[in-house]
Amino acid sequence: MPQYLPTLRLFFPGGVHNDYRLRDGCLEFRVSEGSWRTMDDSEIQLHHRFDTEVSRWLLGYLAEANPYASASSAPAKVSAVGERSLSNRPARKR
């Protein structure tokens, strides 16, 4: 029986697309039909820092995969993976 791998595909002009998937606890990436490669921590942190579609997909999947997680436990998990803050505090004025 084939194994389900959570996957995200983003389409860009010119027929190019990026694929992302979770496999064996790692986030993998490929452009169009190229070779898969494992993303390192700094690449994942960059997605979280800029709140990309990949970051939102990953956070949503992690929340779905752990139905026992509460909103109060999410920031600790996310900060271990990236630098995105999920607190409800208002942003500081500059």
Image (cartoon, rainbow, N blue to C red):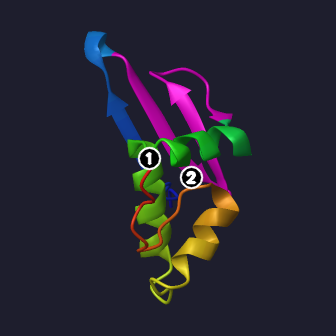
Q: Residue at x 47, y 61 (%)?
A: 59
The x and y percentages for residue 20 are: 50, 40
Q: Look at 54% across and 28% down and name the residue there.
A: 30
Residue drawn at 56 percent across, 73 percent down: 75
Residue with the mark numbered 1: 51
Eye-nearest disc, 2 or 1: 1
Question: Number of marks in the image?
Answer: 2
Using the image as rendered, state which of residue 46 and residue 35 is in the foreground.
Answer: 46
User: Amino acid under label 2?
Assistant: Leu
> Rounded to the nearest whole Å, what is the CA distance between mark 2 and mark 1?
18 Å
In this orientation, which residue lies closer to the viewer: 1 or 49?
A: 49
Disc 1 residue type? Answer: Asp
Q: Earlier in the sequence, mark 2 or mark 1?
A: 2
Q: Is residue 28 above or below residue 34?
A: below
Q: Residues within 10 Å of mark 1 (few under 14, many from 20)?
A: few
Q: Position of residue 94 (x, y in %)?
A: 45, 49
Residue 42: x, y in percent? 70, 40
Chain part drawn in magenta: 16-37
Specify the label residue 22 is tagged with.
2
Element at badge 1? loop
Q: Secondary structure at mark 2?
A: strand
Q: In this orientation, does residue 40 appear?
A: no
